[in-house]
Amino acid sequence: MARGLNRVYLIGTLTARPDMRYTPGGMAVLELNLAGNDLVQDETGTREIPWYHRVKLLGRQAEMWGDALEAGQPLFVEGRLEYRTWETEGQKRSAVEIRADFLDPLQGGARLETVEDARGQVRMRNALNQALLMGNLTRDVELRYTPQGTPVARMGLAVNERTRGQGGAEERTHFLEVQAWRDLAEWAAELRKGEPVLVIGRLVNDSWTSSTGERRYITRVEATRLERLTRGSGQAGGPRPQSASGAKAQTGGVDIEEGLEDFPPEEDLPF
């Protein structure tokens, strides 16, 4: 198993005043809604694509910042993706959340240009929305093509995380979804289950309607760079050659048909 790497970096503006709550055990939880624009390359050139991410900050830092932040405040967040599961009415559910380890307000000014959305929320232009992941593929990469002929690849990534709790060292595995487009997607199609990879990309939120008519949501990483690692694969025969790919990577901007392979434990996910 490859050494886990799970980092998220965001720079954006708060769309509203953060919401503070406490768990039954007394843990402070601060929920922040951050927004910005990504500059994305596709066949038509460079486009601005808006993003909105909900971030959770826990503990003393949450209490420290709870009353200090207002809507419109530019903010830097460093954190990680956190995978969790639960059951509702006997059905398994899963979600990926952004857990902040550190945040710091930024000075405003003319250099940090913003735009206002239809709801009157301020969103930062030329924001930062980056994820760095290192883990092992949970299944073979599946390559498909949109009706327009654009290649798109989807893959599952297992990222190990070691933390220290009251009972000592603990290990968790986060199951994350990655998507790649065009040249990068076609290169990724040769990757197989169990291979260790490095992923660099941006966080995107997708939604779809399940077979029962429920609206479902998922956070995934849209890769701008993928690297095959030469260690940690657990496969015999020595490391496979690296095929660094990403210089020509272009991200989304077209719709694709849903219906790819299920990703456990959420049986209703559209892949």
Image (cartoon, grey):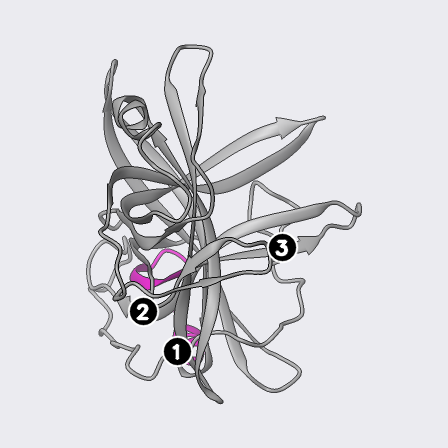
x, y percentage for residue 34?
41, 49
- Residue 25, relative to residue 97: is it above or below? above
Contact, mark 3 vs mark 1 (Cβ under 8 Å): no
Secondary element at tag 2: strand
Judging by the rendered image, the residue that carries numbered circle 3 is 207
Question: 200 or 235, which lies in front?
Answer: 200
Q: Mark 2 to mark 3: distance in Å?
A: 24 Å
Judging by the rendered image, the residue that carries numbered circle 2 is 226
Secondary element at tag 3: strand
Secondary element at tag 1: helix
What residue span does the magenta drawing correspond to? Answer: 184-202
Q: Residue at x 27, y 68 (%)?
A: 227
Q: Is residue 194 magenta?
A: yes
Image-quadrant location for residue 166: top left
Judging by the rendered image, the residue that carries numbered circle 1 is 184
Q: Residue furthest top?
A: 25
